[in-house]
Image (cartoon, grey):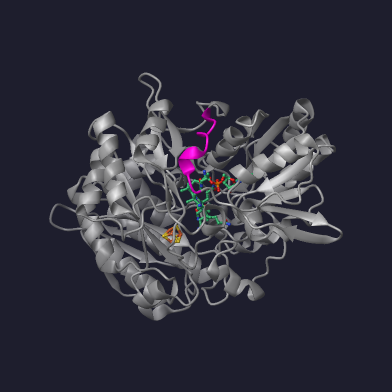
């Protein structure tokens, strides 16, 4: 039977190919191929094309509140765009392929509307085909997804067994009501069968990577692939919804099988960057050591380039594990201390402490690894004092600090608790539940406060990235690597609509402290002001200030020392 799997396009302020790699669909493709079905993949993540589009109504509030006007070097987002094929192109492609079953991935709630629009386009092109939706978002809200008439079935939870059973049943004309994990309409009601999780992950066929355009997913000049050495995590953090599709039990694969899969991904000198997608890669310390050791033995010490973009939990990480990860090929650890306030850590049901984090950072630096630290901003119950304290603490660590604006993941404990107060009745409304929209959550911060705290975190990191003596080389490297910095000579966009035109990037030689200083002094209505240039003995002085009245709780502005800088917050 002919099956088409679709990785839908997304609409957002930015896109990173690594974020779109369709590993789940590649697993599904392999599973149905193993039953003799023919599979095509329409990979919306592989296209680099983008074009400006109107943000959905649900996101306009945050945009109108000034987000889109941000034209500073700290800017993260500018133009709201459609990334990937248009819905018309999807329709044409479906019409030409004439599949019997169309499977669409909907992993992320903010992009649930694009997945639904894809389903409508697919159904228009092939009204006789069966359209199936799967992934995290419909796993949380199968009934909501089935209100869309273009969607015939939803598969909740892990997809391999369920989707294969569904395709087999459809192919043979059998009844589908017993397919595990299937949600379907019958006699005016929605039925949801409990999902199944495969215990022996090594029994699953390896992802059908041949369906991917090898040029599409790259990190710099190197090919990029995702890989799973385990699925599932028993930790039950209250903001996490990974249990919906990965389950609550840690299900490891044999390290030998993982290494064999890695070898299959290498062709001659073409060695990809491997991104481990496990929910909790290092939860089993002995296994993590075994896997890392085997990778080092097989490929050589520090020869590969490995990453775990979705982060590593602190608990499983000790000096020996961190050293083993570095030897295996990790260059950077993504760690999530999330906050430094024990009360919030407990409210999130996390078990990590600040001491765990500091210890990990020390061990990472000793092993030659860089660290990115994620700070949660806007979790219900957090205070501004808490964020400022956390920022202050994290800024003193030799790490890159990434503020992560909180939004409730569909199906997480905190989302279920907040649901009666959240205005998210359909997939379009879920569009606002993304970090880049600074959503106002009951018990969280106002949009203004979120935005200000976000800026502060970016500024603190920026100031740090300049290096102890305000080294312009640091700035230049920062500028050339961040799209944000291309905004430096941009006209002030006050009178423009919320879509800010991306200014032409400046040649690197024109970027430097002088340009930045001039820009900050003349153009930025809020931000960092350069007070005096640093020297070997004296740090560069910046004054950092938000828009007057932007932050509600003002009493926390204070002199804030960042090594080498004298940064002053003015109310
Ligand atoms: C690795 C990972 C990432 C990677 C890349 C993911 C990717 N390629 O898109 C990185 C680190 C970049 C990332 C980023 C983000 N992530 Co993330 N991520 C994960 C993680 C840990 C694993 C996902 C994965 O690859 N699993 C392995 C594959 C095999 O499983 P799968 O893709 O889910 O597919 C299976 C099923 O879902 C199902 N299925 C999937 N599609 C279909 C289609 C059909 C037709 C059928 C039948 C079945 C089916 O079958 C598949 C095989 O079993 C999950 C947690 C989890 N376990 O779900 C969070 C998770 C998906 N991420 C999450 C979030 C919030 C994000 C970010 C928005 C974070 C942020 N604020 O920036 C970004 C957005 C990324 C984007 N694409 O735009 C949330 C999503 C919550 C939600 N409802 O929106 C999750 C659930 C974690 C959480 N916080 O609870 N993420
Ligand atoms: S956030 Fe990480 S550690 Fe917490 S439950 Fe989710 S996967 Fe597990």
On the picture, is 215 further left or further right than 363?
Answer: right
**Residue 244, image x, y percentages:** 56, 57
Q: What residue is rendered at 44% in x and 33% in y?
A: 224
Q: Choose top left, top right, bottom left or bottom right for residue 211.
A: top right
Q: Residue furthest bottom?
A: 555
Magenta part mainly helix, strand or loop?
loop
Q: Residue 200: say if magenta.
A: yes
- 104 and 515: which is toward the camera: 104
On the picture, is 162 further left or further right than 521?
Answer: right
- 163 and 84: which is toward the camera: 163
Task: Name above or below for residue 269 compared with residue 510.
Answer: above
On the picture, is 148 further left or further right than 423?
Answer: right
Residue 316 in sight in this render: yes
Q: What residue is rendered at 21% in x and 45% in y?
A: 368
**Residue 231, image x, y percentages:** 46, 49
Residue 561 in sight in this render: no
Task: Name above or below for residue 404 compared with residue 511.
Answer: below
**Residue 422, image x, y percentages:** 64, 71
Task: Name above or below for residue 353 compared with residue 174.
Answer: below
On the picture, is 35 further left or further right than 349?
Answer: right
Q: Residue furthest left?
A: 537
Placement of the N terminus among the 4 image quadrants? top right
Q: What residue is rendered at 21% in x and 46% in y?
A: 323
- 537 and 563: which is toward the camera: 563
Image: magenta residue range: 199-209
**Residue 457, image x, y percentages:** 38, 61
Task: Name above or below for residue 426 compared with residue 19.
Answer: below
Q: Residue furthest right?
A: 187
Q: What residue is rendered at 65% in x and 39% in y?
A: 164
Placement of the C terminus among the 4 image quadrants? bottom left
> Ligand 2 falls in which quarter?
bottom left
Q: Residue 217: say if magenta.
A: no
């Amino acid at each position: 039977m002919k099956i088409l799997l679709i990785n839908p396009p997304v609409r957002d302020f930015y896109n990173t190919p690594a974020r779109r790699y369709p590993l789940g669909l590649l697993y599904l493709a392999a599973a149905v191929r193993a039953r003799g079905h023919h599979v095509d993949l329409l990979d919306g993540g592989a296209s680099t094309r983008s074009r400006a589009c109107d943000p959905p109504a649900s996101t306009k509030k945050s945009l109108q509140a000034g987000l889109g006007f941000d034209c500073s070097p700290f800017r993260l987002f500018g133009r709201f765009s459609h990334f990937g094929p248009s819905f018309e192109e999807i329709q044409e492609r479906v019409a030409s392929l004439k599949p019997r079953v169309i499977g669409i991935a909907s992993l992320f709630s903010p992009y649930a509307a694009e997945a639904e629009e894809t389903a409508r386009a697919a159904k228009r092109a092939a009204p006789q085909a069966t359209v199936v939706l799967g992934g995290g978002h419909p796993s949380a809200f199968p009934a909501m997804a089935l209100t869309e008439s273009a969607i015939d079935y939803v598969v909740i939870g892990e997809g391999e067994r369920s989707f294969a059973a569904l395709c087999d049943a459809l192919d043979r004309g059998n009844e589908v009501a017993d397919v595990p994990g299937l949600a379907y309409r019958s006699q005016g009601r929605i039925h949801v069968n409990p999902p199944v999780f495969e215990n022996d992950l090594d029994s699953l066929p390896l992802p059908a990577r041949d369906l991917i355009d090898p040029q599409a997913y790259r990190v710099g000049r190197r090919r990029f692939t995702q890989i799973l050495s385990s699925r599932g995590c028993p930790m039950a953090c209250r903001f996490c919804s990974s249990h919906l599709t990965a389950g609550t039990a840690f299900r490891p694969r044999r390290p030998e099988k993982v290494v064999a899969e890695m070898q299959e991904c290498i062709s001659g000198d073409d060695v990809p960057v491997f991104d481990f997608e496990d929910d909790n890669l290092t939860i089993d310390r002995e296994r993590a050591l075994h896997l890392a050791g085997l990778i080092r033995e097989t490929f050589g010490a520090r020869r590969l380039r490995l990453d775990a973009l979705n982060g590593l939990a602190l608990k499983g990480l000790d000096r020996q594990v961190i050293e083993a990860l570095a030897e295996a090929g990790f260059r950077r650890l993504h760690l999530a201390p999330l906050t430094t306030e024990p009360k919030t850590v407990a409210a999130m049901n996390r078990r990590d402490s600040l001491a765990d984090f500091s210890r990990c950072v020390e061990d990472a630096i000793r092993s030659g690894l860089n660290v990115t630290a994620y700070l949660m901003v806007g979790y219900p119950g957090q205070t501004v004092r808490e964020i400022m304290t956390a920022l202050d603490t994290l800024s003193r660590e030799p790490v890159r600090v990434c503020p992560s604006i909180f939004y409730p993941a569909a199906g997480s404990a905190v989302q279920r608790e907040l649901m009666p107060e959240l205005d998210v009745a359909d997939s379009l409304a879920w569009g606002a539940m993304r970090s880049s929209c600074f959503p106002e959550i009951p018990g969280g911060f106002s949009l203004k406060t979120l935005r200000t705290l976000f800026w502060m975190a970016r500024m603190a990191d920026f100031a740090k990235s300049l290096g102890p003596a305000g080294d312009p080389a640091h700035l230049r490297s920062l500028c050339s690597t961040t799209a944000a910095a291309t905004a430096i000579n941009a006209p002030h966009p006050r009178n423009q609509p919320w879509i800010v035109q991306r200014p032409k990037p400046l040649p690197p030689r024109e970027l430097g402290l002088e340009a930045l200083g001039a820009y900050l002094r003349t153009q930025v209505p809020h931000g960092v002001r350069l007070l005096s240039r640093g020297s070997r003995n004296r740090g560069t002085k910046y004054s950092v200030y938000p828009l007057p009245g932007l932050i509600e709780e003002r009493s926390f502005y204070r002199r804030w020392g960042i090594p080498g800088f004298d940064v002053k917050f003015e109310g």
